[in-house]
Structure formats: C-alpha cells, structure tokens
Image (spheres, rainbow, N blue to C red):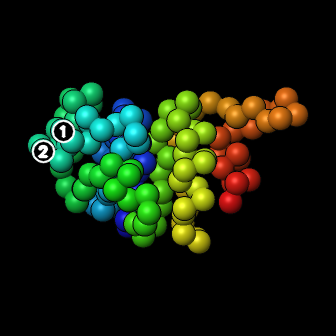
C-alpha cells in the first residue's frame, strides 16, 4: 500500500513508524513549517524531534515539491496539528485525486459558522 503523510512533525512522522513496520511504501511530506525536519530526513533519515531514524521504503518531500501533482496513494494521512487543519483543508483537499482516502489524525474540533462543532474528519468530508 502507498501512504502519503502530510505533516512531518511529531504526529505525522509517528504515523510513518507503524506504516513502515507493516511493509507499506510511505512518502512523508512536510508542510511549510517543516522545512528543517524534511531537509534533515533527506540527508540522514534521522528525525530530530522523534529522535530516531525512519528506515524502510520511505521518501521525504516538502509539500511544495508535490503540491502541483499529489502522488498517487491509497491513503493520504493528514498529520498536521489542529492549527494546520485549515491549511490542509484549503491547500490539500482540493488537489486530491478522485477516490483518494484521507485519514485525519488531527485532534480537535472545527467551529462551524452556526456555532456548532464538528470533528476534523467530518469537516474534511464536507469539503470533498
């Protein structure tokens, strides 16, 4: 299975560990805030905040490198923080290919204009 994880902070990168351990192909894409992490991973596979190497069938990209052509994948993981959920909704979701599944590991809730709350996955589903 091909898995694209967007967000290379602690949450997104941690999702790569079990995916790799289960034999999946992973692309870890950093948000505009993740440049230093991705550059370090490209150089040595070492994640400076997880304090471990990410080993296996994994590649590292900045989102800007793939934003014009999001790679084919079986699953896209939104590994951004709750503060990045809006960026993901505006920047990534409109560019997904038909049929790509999104797994949101972002915690938190989205406030709707009517004052009610919805989970981040519910919000993302409504955008597609």
**Circle 1/circle 2 CB separation < 8 Å:** yes
| Residue at figure coordinates x 70%, y 54% from the top left | 127
Label 2 crowd bin: few (<14), some (14–19), many (20+), radius 10 Å:
few
- In the rendering, which numbered label is found on residue 40? 1
The number of numbered discs placed on residues in the rendered structure image is 2
| Residue at figure coordinates x 39%, y 50% from the top left | 63
Distance, label 1 to label 2, CA atoms, is 5 Å
Helix, strand or loop status at disc 2: helix
The answer, for residue 20, to whether it is visible in the render is: no
Image position of 24 with respect to 64: above or below: below
Label 1 crowd bin: few (<14), some (14–19), many (20+), radius 10 Å:
some
| Residue at figure coordinates x 48%, y 57% from the top left | 76
Q: In which quadrant of the rendered view does residue 31 lie?
A: top left
Locate residue 12, reporting x and y percent.
Answer: 40, 41
In the picture, measured across the screen, residue 70 lies left or right of residue 51, that is right
Q: Mark 2 = which residue?
A: 43
Q: Quadrant of the N terminus?
A: bottom left
Residue placed most toward the observer, 70 or 81: 70
Image position of 57 with respect to 104: above or below: below
Residue extending farthest to the right is 114
């Amino acid at each position: 299975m091909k898995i694209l994880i967007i967000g290379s902070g602690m949450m997104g990168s941690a999702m790569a560990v079990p995916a790799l351990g289960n034999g999946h192909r992973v692309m870890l894409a950093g948000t505009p805030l993740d440049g230093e992490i991705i550059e370090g991973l490209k150089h040595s596979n070492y994640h400076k905040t997880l304090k471990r190497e990410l080993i296996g069938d994994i590649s590292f990209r900045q989102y800007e490198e793939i934003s014009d052509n999001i790679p084919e994948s079986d699953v896209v993981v939104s590994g951004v923080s709750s503060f990045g959920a809006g960026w993901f909704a505006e920047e990534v979701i409109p560019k997904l290919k038909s049929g790509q599944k999104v797994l949101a590991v972002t915690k938190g809730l989205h406030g709707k204009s009517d004052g009610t709350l919805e989970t981040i996955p519910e919000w993302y589903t409504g955008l597609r």
